[in-house]
Image (cartoon, rainbow, N blue to C red):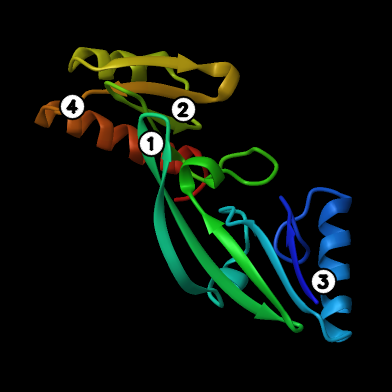
């Protein structure tokens, strides 16, 4: 029998609750009984490098979602007789399963601009520096971040200010 599990989590790759335990335990048992078992889960950035380094690229394509096209990649990994497929899309799966971002800077494309979100930085003086070079920025202390609206073109001064903020976010997020 051919069996495909689709789940939001699966042990040992990513776990927040019981679903991960069930999928992670049941799939190998069914495979040992001779079934063709496959599991499909999101490629969260929180999946440990030990697993990500074993994944093989299968294919990628674009999915039309409203007015935009979104990248979707598929990677695979064989373990205990089970083929695991990981759906890659950093726009949707770029945060860890617990909802805490593993990225200190990430992007949200909008229709007429790109919102850049710098995690770990909320200081109003940083917002003021960005506004001084003509950027639309706002501190969001409740989300522990600064949001910046970025148009299609940026001046050298704006690029320099954004680079400085990215370095600060990198440091504040504990990555340096």
The Cα–Cα distance between marks 4 and 1, rounded to whole angstroms, is 15 Å
Q: Secondary structure at mark 3?
A: helix
Tell which of 59 and 145 is nearer to you: 59
Q: CA distance from mark 3 to mark 2?
A: 42 Å
Report, in whole angstroms, how far the alpha carbon at label 3 lies from the one at label 4: 51 Å
Count of numbered marks:
4
Disc 1 to disc 3, C-alpha distance? 44 Å
Task: Look at the numbered discs 2 and 1 and tell me whether their residues touch, using CB distance below 8 Å.
Answer: yes
Mark 3 Cα shell of 10 Å, populated few (<14), some (14-19), many (≥20): many
In the rendered image, residue 123, in percent from the top left (x then y), is placed at: 44, 19
In which quadrant of the rendered view does residue 98 lie? top right
Disc number placed over residue 168 in the picture, else none: 1
| Residue 121 disc label | 2
In the rendered view, would you say 119 is above or below 51?
A: above
Q: CA distance from mark 2 to mark 1?
A: 7 Å
Q: From the image, which quarter does the N terminus lie in?
A: bottom right
Q: Are marks 1 and 3 in contact (CB under 8 Å)?
A: no
Q: Which residue is label 4 attached to? A: 158
Residue 76 to residue 97: above or below: below
Q: Is residue 51 left or right of residue 91?
A: right
Label 2 vs 4, first from the N-terminus? 2
Occupied quadrant, residue 157: top left
Which residue: 57% across, 23% down? 143
Could you tell me residue 168's position as x and y percent?
Answer: 38, 36
Q: Earlier in the sequence, mark 4 or mark 1?
A: 4
Observer-side mark, 1 or 3, equals 3
């Amino acid at each position: 029998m051919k069996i495909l599990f689709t789940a939001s989590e699966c042990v040992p790759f990513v776990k927040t609750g019981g679903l991960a335990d069930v999928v992670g335990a049941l799939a190998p048992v069914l495979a040992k009984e001779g079934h063709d078992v496959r599991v499909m889960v999101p490629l969260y950035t929180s999946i440990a490098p030990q697993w990500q380094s074993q994944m093989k690229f299968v294919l990628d394509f674009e999915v039309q979602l409203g007015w935009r096209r979104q990248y979707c990649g598929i990677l695979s990994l064989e373990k205990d007789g089970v083929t695991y497929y990981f759906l890659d899309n950093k726009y949707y799966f770029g945060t860890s399963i617990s909802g805490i971002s593993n990225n200190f800077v990430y992007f949200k494309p909008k229709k007429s601009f790109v919102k850049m979100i710098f995690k770990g930085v909320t200081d109003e003086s940083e917002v003021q520096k960005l506004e001084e070079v003509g950027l639309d920025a706002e501190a969001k202390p409740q989300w522990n971040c600064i949001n910046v609206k970025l148009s299609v073109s940026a001046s050298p001064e704006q690029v320099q200010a954004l680079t400085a903020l990215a370095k600060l976010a990198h440091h504040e997020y504990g990555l340096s």
